[in-house]
Image: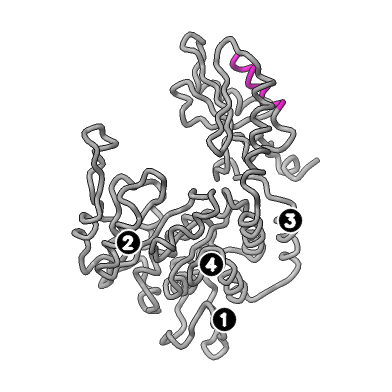
Amino acid sequence: MGIYDDIGVRTIINAKGASTRVSGGLLAPEVTAAMAEAATHCVDMADLQAGASKIIAGVTGAEAGIVTSGAAAGLLLGTAACVAGLDPGRMSRLPDTTGMKNEVIMVRSQRNFYDHAVRAAGVKIIEVGLPDRFAGAGVRDAEGWEIADAITDRTAAVMYVANGNARPSLEDVVKAAHGRNVPVLVDAAAQLPPVSNLKRFIAAGADLVSFSGGKAIGGPQGSGILCGRRDLVMSAVLQMLDLDIDWSMWVPPANLIDKDRLPGLPQHGIGRPCKVGKETIVGLLVALRRFVAHDPEAVRKVNLARVEKMAAELGRMRNGTVSVRDGGSPKLVVMLNPDAGKNGLAVCLALQEGTPSIYLDSSQAANGVISVNPTCMADGDAVPLARRLREVIG
């Protein structure tokens, strides 16, 4: 009997990827060992975050960094930092932003479910640009001048969602924002790999960057990184930490928190529900060092071998076409034949409800395209997955 059997929850084969909905990926043994060791000692959490800051700064090129309870928590904390700065009174009043800069500019085509974390700080999102390229009405999207034009004395920050298709460029956004002394907060949750992206956004001038720790980095699922300007990171961590201590007794780590810049000790802030435990911080740091040191080609070969093994097991299929796609991140793709009489979403649902329970990438299933992402699969998952896929598709 395993722990999940004891709880009454069945395990799954995760061929979807490092998605929170399917609990992320599998932790490396050294990560779980570090977390277990961390659980056997107590530390001052401010000291631990300060130690994390040194490591995060080293790998990102940022002035400072902290471990958060996920990338979305980083967006909330980052927004709160841009609004409140180092003013304890403002920190205490959030999400009431009366009398504060309480608008965040965002390109309309970058709006998504996760910007709820930004709005949770009490700000209003100001949209700019018309995404004609997505509507099919033209080729244009937002441009740098539109961001500059939208900045007012109420603007607390510019929010930028990084991806390979984002417009305008981050450099153009930074130029527009910094020209009016407005910070830029980047959502880079899923922008790893490559490892070089850990430094790219800071190098481009971003003031704060939020990464997921539970995806490509391979850390605990409920972890993330917020890095950037030291004063903003300091504000963010002050709005997250347990500060139930007398001012005279409070001796924060100087490399992360400059006590002399504060008129008094902030109350528990809006980020207090985003607290992160010592085990998660340590696990994330070990995973981060491992991610930076890993050989991406070796990882690609492991995943390619899994995909090729599944393709060989599937062979030729009557109701679909099997292909191996390797654009740096290998995947197995099954395209259902138009006359197969099979609905892609129904196939994915049947795999989830069957034994073993298998979760695939169903993002294109409505169009008859089913993808198998091997990054979160265990070594013994390939054959049973392929056999079950053949049974369901026919």
Q: Helix, strand, or loop for circle 4?
A: strand
Q: Quadrant of the N terminus?
A: top right
Q: Which residue is mark 1?
A: 253
Q: Point out the frontmost of discs 3 and 2.
A: 2
Q: Helix, strand, or loop for circle 2?
A: helix
- Find out whether the residues at labels 4 and 1 contact each other: C-beta distance under 8 Å: no
Q: Amino acid at mark 3?
A: Glu
**Residue 174 shows which numbered tag?**
2
Q: Amino acid at mark 4?
A: Ile
Q: Quadrant of the C terminus?
A: top right
Residue extent of the magenta highlight = 383-394
The image shows residue 98 at horizontal and vertical percentages of 27, 70
Residue 175: in magenta span:
no
Name the foreground residue: 261 vs 307. 307
Name the foreground residue: 344 vs 191. 191
Q: Which residue is mark 3?
A: 30
In the shown orientation, is residue 40 left or right of residue 80?
right
Q: CA distance from mark 3 to mark 4?
A: 21 Å
Q: Point out the frontmost of discs 1 and 3.
A: 3
Q: Amino acid at mark 1?
A: Pro
Q: CA distance from mark 2 to mark 4?
A: 22 Å
Q: Helix, strand, or loop for circle 3?
A: helix
Location of residue 207 with respect to 186 vertically, above or below: below
Q: CA distance from mark 4 to mark 1?
A: 13 Å
Name the foreground residue: 383 vs 23. 383
Residue drawn at (67%, 44%) of the image: 298
Q: Amino acid at mark 2?
A: Val
